[in-house]
Image (cartoon, grey):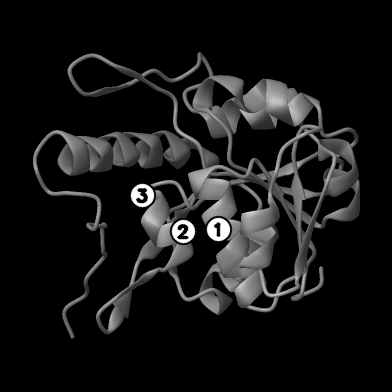
Amino acid sequence: MSQNPRIALIGAGNVGGNLGILLARSGFSIRFGVREGKDLKDVLARCEGRADVTSVPEAAKWADVIILAVPGNAVVEAAGSLGDISGKVLVDCNNPLRWDDGPVHTPPPEGSLTAALAKAFPKARVVKGFSTFGSEFHLDPKIGTTSVDVQLAGDDAEAKALVASIATRAGFTPIDVGPMRNAAHLESLAILWIHLALRAGQGREVAFKLLKRG
């Protein structure tokens, strides 16, 4: 698969919008797939001429890589509106949760949203990624002289490598955390981030980093 893939962002809220802006500024061709009537003038203006907007099915058909950035309870339904995504890389950057004086992980029966997507769309190449930090880092992955880790989980090694190359080019540090079953651990890590940021007083400008001695 091309190392300069066409990337569709499904969802253009804080996460999808910021990540689309960053990827466009990193030289990728971007299409936002949104519902009719969604105004993305401000987002497109920040994409430096490398992005446009179209319907969800049209964006998915055009793309090599599809990044889902929608509410956790709408992930599988949103993927169902993409059309035929056989062979395409589908990146799940969502987390299932409810709020009970703080975030509570509410995974589907499959164990994670990523596994639920893989079950519902077995011909897609599903990868978990861009899911364990706040939207501020989707726009700017740098902290001082280092960069935020993007943990990637999935059973398709080639798809993970492609997503890792996208993350690297955008300024992140990709970390392969293993098979799809580990996507559940990334969702738990995201819940911990939300707790630390919003309930434990750490604030949103924090992120997890894998450190190695030597």
Dot 2 and dot 1 residues touching (CB under 8 Å): yes
Q: Any mark on residue 134, and which? A: 3
Q: Is residue 177 at least partly visible in the picture?
A: yes
Q: Residues within 10 Å of mark 2 (few under 14, many from 20)?
A: many
**Quick one: SS at disc 2?**
helix
Q: Residues within 10 Å of mark 1 (few under 14, many from 20)?
A: many
x and y percentages locating residue 114 in the rendered image = 56, 34
- Residue identified by numbered label 1: 19
Q: Mark 2 vs mark 1: which is more N-terminal?
A: 1
Distance, label 2 to label 1, CA atoms, is: 5 Å
Distance, label 1 to label 3, CA atoms, is: 11 Å
Q: On screen, 29 above or below 32?
A: below
Distance, label 2 to label 3, CA atoms, is: 7 Å
x and y percentages locating residue 107 in the rendered image = 44, 20
x and y percentages locating residue 121 in the rendered image = 76, 30
The residue lying at 78 percent from left, 25 percent from top is 80
**Quick one: SS at disc 3?**
loop
x and y percentages locating residue 137 in the rendered image = 39, 60
Which residue is nearer to you in this view: 11 or 115? 11
The kind of residue tagged 2 is: His
Q: Any mark on residue 138, and which? A: 2
Dot 2 and dot 3 residues touching (CB under 8 Å): yes
Quarter of the figure that contains the C terminus = bottom left
The kind of residue tagged 3 is: Gly
Q: On screen, 32 above or below 213?
A: above
Residue 159 lies left or right of residue 103; in this view the side is right
Quarter of the image for residue 90 reads: top right
